[in-house]
Amino acid sequence: MTHDAESGLKLDGYLPYRLSVASNAVSGLIARAYQDRFGLTIPQWRLICVLAEDGGLTQNQIVARTVMDKVTVSRAAQGLLKRRLVGRSDHHADGRSHVLTLTHEGSRLHSEIAPLALAYEAALIAGLAPEEVNLLKRLLSRLQSAAGALAGESLPPSLR
Amino acid sequence: MTHDAESGLKLDGYLPYRLSVASNAVSGLIARAYQDRFGLTIPQWRLICVLAEDGGLTQNQIVARTVMDKVTVSRAAQGLLKRRLVGRSDHHADGRSHVLTLTHEGSRLHSEIAPLALAYEAALIAGLAPEEVNLLKRLLSRLQSAAGALAGESLPPSLR
DNA sequence: CGGATTTAGTATCAGATGAAACTAGATCGC
DNA sequence: GCGATCTAGTTTCATCTGATACTAAATCCG
């Protein structure tokens, strides 16, 4: 059984707790690496990643693409602009929007960091079978969408 | 292949990203529930849980037991003290320490929240096979300890 | 013993976070 | 066409977070 019979709940076996602790450990590790080596925050790094993948995007598109708050994206963009790692040009059809693109320097930085990011991932999953990693990713996706569904809709009776 | 050949890195498939996004979604859901219904923060709730499980503990023991900063534990304890959900008595052998225990009211609150917490977990893992959930927990543990190892030791050449 | 170091817990500060208010531009509906 | 509403993005504010500094008690060791 997952939880004991008495209280019905043990913190160590409680999934949201395990998830949070594991995520904090991993995020902390990665955040420190990017900060120390490149002066980037995690939101800034995510922004660089999606711009490298998808090319020019508006902040709104970035919000939709990554799961970040628009305020977070705004601040990350400002920081990157100041360092000239991204450029912004007016949107051809919408005066409120700007299109963000990586500068040459931003691109260079991305290709410098990417191998490091992959090395971290590889070190983290060392010892796991590839199919375990794939399963893990699928399970994480399911948890995410389950949480989203529970947060969005009116709550089912069991949680009311 | 997990990542594309060009940049070698796709954000959507990047494990630390998936982990962080899933964890934020789940934590946010749970944090809102505890806050709205019981006025508890997540650290406060964790504290209540370990006290319910293990009985009287010093803050130091709580820090070791949960993976929280001592500052976080200190603040959580103060909040719970103010609401008289926990009591503190002098440690018999160490004048710096105090032993925290749940008050009657704290105990009552715990047994009120626990079923809700379990219902949330059940809703999150609905549709997953039990062995998938177990595997997930084991994988999360491995990631956590791998991250801890990478953070602690001097870095291996691949990450230097 | 008694000074030097370590440890439990608190206080302070600087940075990050997201909710809510706000500005300016776009879209809708009459 | 033009006011009402909506949307992209920024600013503000209140809160959370953890690093650092600090206080008081304990332990170590000469």
Image (cartoon, coloured by chain):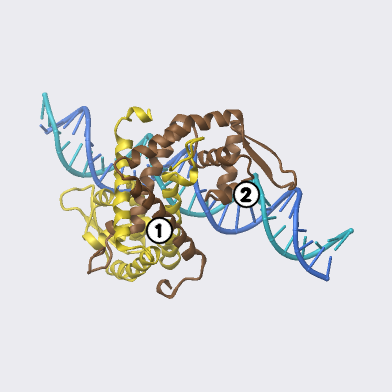
Chain colours: A brown, B yellow, C blue, D cyan
Instruction: Name the quadrant containing residue B81.
Output: bottom left
State left or right for residue B37 relative to residue A80: left
B149 or A72: nearer the viewer: B149
Q: Is residue B138 above or below residue C2?
A: below
Q: Which mark is residue A17?
A: none
Q: Is residue A44 above or below residue B77?
A: above
Mark yes or no: residue B78 visible.
no
Mark 1 crowdedness (10 Å alpha carbons): few <14, some 14-19, many ≥20: some
| Residue at the (38%, 47%) spot, across then down | A24
The residue under label 2 is: A60
Q: Is residue A125 above or below residue B42?
A: above
Mark yes or no: residue A64 visible.
yes
Quadrant of the snapshot with the N terminus of chain B: top left
Image coordinates of residue B145 in percent, x first then y, are: 29, 43
| Residue at the (31%, 50%) spot, across then down | B139
| Residue at the (47%, 59%) spot, across then down | A145
Mark 2 crowdedness (10 Å alpha carbons): few <14, some 14-19, many ≥20: some
Q: Identify the amino acid type marked 2.
A: Asn
Q: Is residue A64 above or below residue A158?
A: above
A78 or A30: nearer the viewer: A30
Q: Identify the amino acid type marked 1.
A: Thr
D18 or B92: nearer the viewer: D18
What chain is tagged by disc 2? A
What chain is tagged by disc 1? B
The residues bearing labels 2 and 1 have C-alpha atoms spaced at a distance of: 31 Å
Instruction: Name the quadrant containing residue A73.
Output: top right
The residue under label 1 is: B41
